[in-house]
Image (cartoon, rainbow, N blue to C red):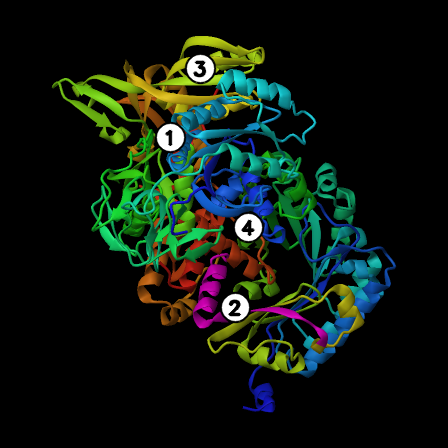
Amino acid sequence: MSTNDTSHIRNFSIVAHIDHGKSTISDRILELTHTVEERDMEAQLLDTMDIERERGITIKSNAVRVMYDADDGQTYQFNLIDTPGHVDFTYEVSRSLAACEGAVLVVDATQGVEAQTVSNANLAMNANLDIVPAINKIDLPSAHPDEVKEEIEEDLAIPADDAVCVSGKTGEGIHDLLEAIVFLVSPPRGSYDAPLKALILDSYFDEYRGVVATVRVFDGHVAKGDQLLMMQGGTDFLVDGVGVRRPAEQPVDELGVGEVGYVVTGLKDPEAVRVGDTLTYRDRPCDEVLPGYREAKPMVYTGLFPVDNKDYENLRDALEKLRVNDPSLTWTPETSVALGFGFRVGFLGLLHMEVVKERLEREFGLSLIATSPSVDYHVYQTDGQMVCVRSPQDLPDVTRIERIEEPFLKAKVIVPPEFTGAVMQLAIEHRGITQDMVYLSEKSVEMHFDIPLAELILDFFDQLKSRTKGYASLDYDFSDYRPSDLVKLDILLSGDEVDALSFIVHRDKAYALARGLCDKLKEIIPRQQFEVPIQGAIGNKIIARSTVKAVRKDVLAKCYGGDISRKRKLLEKQKEGKKRMKQIGSVEVPQEAFLAVLKVDDQ
Amino acid sequence: MSAEGQRGAAPGVGALYLHVPFCARKCAYCDFASWATPTGDPLMGSYSRALEAQLDEVAGMGLLEGCETAYVGGGTPTLLGADRLGSLVERVARLAAPSELTCEANPDSLTDDVLDAARAAGATRLSVGVQSLDDGELAELGRLHDAACARERVRAAVASGLDVSVDLMCATPGQTDASWASTLAGALSLGVGHVSVYPLQIEEGTALGELWRHEDPAWNDGDVQASRMKQAQAVLEGSGLVRYEVASYAAAGRQCRHNIAYWTGVTYLGLGTGASSMLNLKQYLRLSQACPSLPEPPSSAARVRLTVETTRAEVAADPRIAALSFSTEFLSHREAVAEDLMLAMRMTSGVGPGLLARARETVPAGRLEAAVGEAVATGLAAWSGGRLVPTECGWLLGNELYGLMWDLAADDA
């Protein structure tokens, strides 16, 4: 399309609260536009990672081109940019939205507007996108689309007369939705002949082709053989090919103004391509860089250690490869007496941590130990210096600490009124300070708390969901640093402190946590040939203890002719099990012990 | 070398096992190849006749030449009844002429007729599945007999002049230290010369396994198993029996030589559904000639394990060895040595100089010394008169000790 005419292009995202059905709507669109034949349909096509499909969540953005034959007889090019739904991945949403002119805002017809509906709608409106409201799941008996329309108008201030009622499950209304996109979403603007100005939305590393970047062209055009420059990174390269995803990659001659597609950079250094950077011609650059994204800041830090120390370099390489399409990932080397060499890795949240750990293990064949999550503490020392501490091991000696400040969040919970008491109780248990409560409607109350990040990252979200029968939604923003009475809780196995099990905790909760941890570790650590005392300590003071009793008997007594092979196989299985454990001193500790703090039952 | 040459050169197996996969009822803990079978089921007759035919065939191949011991196990061989069991035992005695011939028996089907028939046919030894002498415990286990029946039948067996052993089971539902003590004492009072004691193992696919799928019952806890096994040792040794294997106690000269064969690398042939064999390469090649479906052994093979996968009905329908299907497992010299070391550590006599010398030839020196060193350092084994023998701790933590030995089978990271 070597022309300035972009009137047939529509670039849009689909945004929604988690579970409101964004991915199924995407799938129906692919089906209806014959991008993917029905028989090839796998549920949630756009979620390509195993983990995404297993968990039913979208983690990575994904851009797909579909061609739509509209009722007006014209064929439109739709670039559909899928976005993540979990609170941990908000930054991916903002990045995707910057590449669009429009957004389909999906709202569940049974649940109505939820916390992330509001935050995503706000993101979309701040990005000046044309919004197409879609009310999903109208096939359900409990659907109440008219009330949801009112909520959209009242809570989001978005006109809902044009809201399209759809069912991602049955496909009902999807055609109307596509028509609405044609009419409501503006075509992209820009100049075909101007110097290239393209935004890098995402990238991944391909062993043979190097870094492949997903881009949105705002001005100009790009084709194989173009010499390009990354304006912020400063790297230049020769384009090895361009194409679009439908959703399988399909090479094209060029990506014109307004279009979305991929650029094969041939660059072998994953670090050279930064998501958010602007691509332009090396010899004819555009005059300004596109506005960058809100940079994703890690909230949670955990140690990641290879079970086998020989894998340290492999872990570093793997992290670097993941970073190519997950720029929020940051790390610094960390050394543990117990676990050897590893990295302290920053994550957006615990889900992000789990996903990254799982990807490292599955995609790179690593066996990893993750240690207890920590936040970024500000430790003011008696010498007047302030140090940032992200790992309990880095906490200075107690005599050198004047005070410790911890990050607080402003948390917003939207919940039906009958659960406000339960939520308040939960907040108190997590050192939260209730600020106010606003009735959004008869059926929903918005509650505001100040709450320490450290409390929120553990089990707050799961607890919130369980105590409100899944009704509550949570959103949060960083507030400020506040002084807290924090102590380092150490865990000793057979009398030796295991640094990787230490944890920074509020003094008031230290005793209960120490007891909980000792009990949980007793369950997790298998019985060994000798007794293993487990102790929780603050400084030199032991505040909790438990004991893993020595195993006294471990044998299949019967062993005749037919049992011998079976016996050997059992021994081999036993050995495999041991390989997954970490030898600490003389104690064999399973990987999950290091995350025991996440499993301590909340009394 | 011709087949004739092989036949002349190699003796047959050292031990013979026949499997009778019939029981009156499946016990709650049992995961053996055995199925509840109604009395009068014609399958029992056709199956035992098929075993006899197979015995004829393997004897014809020379595989029973030099056979020292035989064992008719199950299942419940006594369920076959006097005529069929007698006929089967007689065939074994005639073709293999073992100096020890054991029949497994359950008290409820060990009638006087069966007892007489087995003895008359050539059985020398009887192993009775008593398990407990507490009626409540027996009911929990799903056994068909009660304590009175067990006592009476074992007495009858002892009186018949056969060498009698009883199996007892500990860490079972409802068992207490006191009831276990009384079972042990009761068994000894019957005049048996051999006792085997096992902790109950909850296996997948059994009634108990279903019941205790998600938690481990307190009555089967490792500590309970350990203390009951120690209790058994004290009582049995106190009455003059000697422990010769982790679970086996015998009066002088009354050890089960057939079981010792399993633990000392003697070759054995197993016939019947689910039965296992351990053959040397020559014996395996000889069997292959009769059973062409057996795979070619790899060049590294020194020892072969086979298990009959053919069902009871199939065995009965076509008794030819050629019609059998086996699963096979080939072990190298080094694996065979590691297996012998692993099994030797079950025995009081442990690993002697002969096996040690074999191990030094096949296992890298550093590995062998390290494993032995670790076993001694952790108190699982000790040196005694030039032999490496298991300690009490090694017996209780057998899997640790056996694991150390089996690890010698291969080099790995």
Q: Which residue is mark 4?
A: A35
**Labels 1 and 4: the sequence-earlier one:** 4
Label pair 3/4, CB-CB below 8 angstroms? no
**Magenta region includes residue A124:** no
Quarter of the view holding residue A20: top right
Question: Seen from this angle, which residue lies furthest left?
Answer: A383
Q: CA distance from mark 1 to mark 4?
A: 59 Å
Q: Image check: A9 left or right of A266?
A: right
User: Residue A495 in the image: x percent, y percent?
Assistant: 31, 32
- Are discs 3 and 1 located on one and the same chain? yes
Q: Which residue is mark 1?
A: A534
Q: Image check: B249 left or right of A215?
A: right
Name the element at disc 3. Answer: helix
Q: CA distance from mark 3 to mark 1?
A: 30 Å
- Looking at the image, is mark 2 or mark 3 nearer the viewer? 3
Q: Which residue is mark 3?
A: A427
Name the element at disc 4. Answer: loop
Give the chain letter at badge 2. Answer: B
